[in-house]
Image (spheres, rainbow, N blue to C red):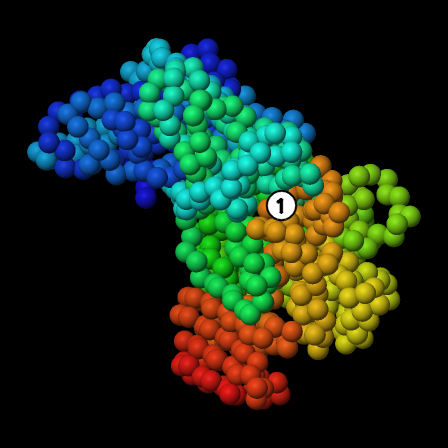
Amino acid sequence: MLIRHASHASWIRMKDADSLTVPVFRKIFACRGRVKAASLEVTCDGVYEAQLNGSRVGDFILAPGWTEYSKRLQVQRYDITSMLQENNSLEVTVGNGWFRRTNAPWTGTQNPDEFLPAMLIAALHIVYEDGSEEVILTDDSWEVSKSTVTLSGIFIGEDVDMTLKMEYEKAQTCVYPKNILIEQEGPQVREQETIYPCRSFRTPKGEWVLDFGQNMTGYMAFEMDAHAGERLSLSTAEVLDRSGNFYTANYRSARSQLHYICREGHQSYKPRLTFFGFRYLRIDEAPENFSADQIHAIVLHSEMNRTGWLQCSSPLLNQLFENIVWSQKGNYLDIPTDCPQRDERYGWTGDGQIFCRTATYQYDVRQFFRKWLGDMRAAQHENGWVPEVIPSLTAYNPGGAAWSDAVTIIPWQLYQTYGDISFVADMYEAMEKWIAYIPTVSKTPYLWTGCWTYGDWLALDAPPDYKPATIELSKRGYSNDDLVCSAFYANSVDIVIRVGKLLGRDVKAYEELHGQIVSAFQKTFGGRLNTQTEKVLALHFNLAESPEKVAAALAYQIRACGMKLQTGLLGTPYLLHELTRYGYAEIAWSLLLRREYPGWLYSVSRGATTVWEHWDGIKPDGTFWDDDMNSYNHYAYGSVADWVFGEACGIQPLEPGFARAKIEPHPDRRVQSMSAILDTVQGRIRSAWKYTDNGIRYEIETPVQTEIILGNEKRVVGNGRYIFGE
Ligand code: BGC
């Protein structure tokens, strides 16, 4: 889509409105003949909902989405041909969305323009049957009023007063850049599923609560009869506390509520300019006779087709697989977020890269990432530094290892899954700038030392008497920060070399650099691979001098501490892969199947329906890990699904995009059967295994030439379906 008309329009605003006012802009116009085709191009500095003659225009929720606003703002174009009448009224309500910080002061400024009032730019283009054309652009002939939405924000939720009468005044044109306008790049966020409450009950405190049975991202919708001035107030929560009461402390400063003042008569409503992460709703106030069956929930996420499915004989594992899918749905709402409920919901680059491989297996996320990587390029600083959240915020830490390395890791993963070289080609310059930045801040040549990092965030291996200087440090376990940073530096340089070769660039200097990093790493850290994560990173990024010995030490260490993982955000995604690669698949399985803390099945056995931020977000005694940083929809540890696809079921690309594949399953008797389906760009790959009386039966389906490795036997097969064993 090309922006044809909107760039000729003027930005308009409401005179004297402050930055939190939610205006509705209006244009009344008549068609001067029979309409052949008509379109609306529109965007705003916030989020909007457009209605034409009382019907919603399009089904893009929270348009125009979140981009690096100071550089890129998406414009949408809607076909409105069938909506036009002789006399028309177009109304566009503009809320704060992601553009303005309505709370969460600790995040600093969300974007330098956040104190500007709501603004709109739009163009209607009408082609008449007689061949003539008409373009209606936003200008001071448009009108504007305060809308029925009296407060709106991503973290706040929405306040609505349906008794308000619109008082329109002339809109004002204003100056705001138009060179930031870009075509729509990402997939649209749409309503995806409807969920009805499975339980309506009173908590011990007497609160009236509805349980939807699924932690989700979206909003509530209701229909009822009411008198003008009656109120419906709803609060959201992900979990109940151990007494069974409604628990919201983990939302921190995100109010996350809907306050609705009714008009007279029959009415239905759903929030128009915000979203919530929730499983439970508390009905704080309701019109008389309001009942639970008048309300339902609507799941929102970016449009993406499902491509991967896991299924096995263990109900707990199946629930884990479901939870991982739900955490992707919950956190792929226009950008990949860390969590969808508390006062963050940011595009944390670390979480984004950790989960990226799993994401590409579960859904087709090509368009989703193409847009976000565009924002990453736009947000990268001149000196090469990549912010830790994309779109960027102004008041944050300097990002660093594993977070900023998303600039190399994500495009490389997209290329592996989809075989589309443009993912790495488009990012090559950004990757080169990033690895050129590291030596400018590092204290040691060929290593990455002395810099800010989140380290192995949330690792469990700090000794009990460890008293770090800051709270931030207390959350990152005991792995050596310099080692962690240097390992990711080596990996990013390695990716730049591989991409450079693909693109036919001269990569000699990078190869030399990589050699120097590896030897500096081995010299400095080779004898000091103490924690599980230190070992895992050295193995995963091929930095260990004697990988077999390191892997054996890792296996020993895990057994010695009672078959427990101690890794944080950085070690965990690679842990099972490295154990399997060096012959310890049985330990990888033990970790996966562990039902106690710390383990993937612990949250599942506590009734989780999405992946938790902390293994023990709810402790065995029912108390919480903490109020401060305790999300129940945090996909990072869900990255274990790529081990299940890639190792347990054994599906790997031998060439990017699965142009050739390898299938080398690693079954384990503790699970009777398992199957993975992956709809690759080449077609469907299926790998299933099942323990039988006679051994194991494998069923494999592949659309491409594939190496099938079962135990010590390797065969190369063409496309087809194969059964081995009985
Ligand atoms: C987020 C994480 C993120 C981290 C940075 C947290 O508050 O929720 O998932 O990566 O900050 O360490």
Above or below — where is 150 with respect to 243?
A: above
Amino acid type shown at disc 1: Tyr
| Residue 400 seen anywhere in this rendered image of the structure | no
Q: Splitting the image into 4 quarters, where does residue 554 fall?
A: bottom right
Image position, residue 710 (x, y; %)? 57, 84
Res. 209 visible in picture: yes
- How far across and down, in percent of the image, does residue 268 sit? 36, 29
Towards the viewer: 582 or 396? 582
- Which residue shows up at 31% across the image and 32% down it? 56
**Residue 603 to residue 501: above or below:** above
User: Ligand 1 sits in which quadrant?
Assistant: top right
Quadrant position of the N terminus in the picture: top left
Determine whether 572 is above or below 347 in the image: below
Query: Which residue: 65% across, 33% down?
Result: 204
- Tell which of 582 and 622 is nearer to you: 622
**Residue drawn at (10%, 31%) of the image:** 34
In terms of secondary structure, where does tag 1 sit? loop
Residue that appears at 46% across and 73% down: 686
**Left or right placement of residue 444 versus residue 421 in this view:** right
Determine whether, in the image, residue 97 is placed left or right of residue 636. Answer: left
x, y percentage for residue 426?
Answer: 49, 54
On screen, residue 4 versus residue 285, left or right, reads: left
Which residue is label 1 attached to? Answer: 632
Residue 723, horizontal then vertical, whole percent: 47, 85
Q: Count residues near mark 1 (Cα–Cα under 10 Å), then give few for <14, some for 14-19, many for 20+.
A: many
Examine the image and state in which quarter residue 712 appears.
bottom right
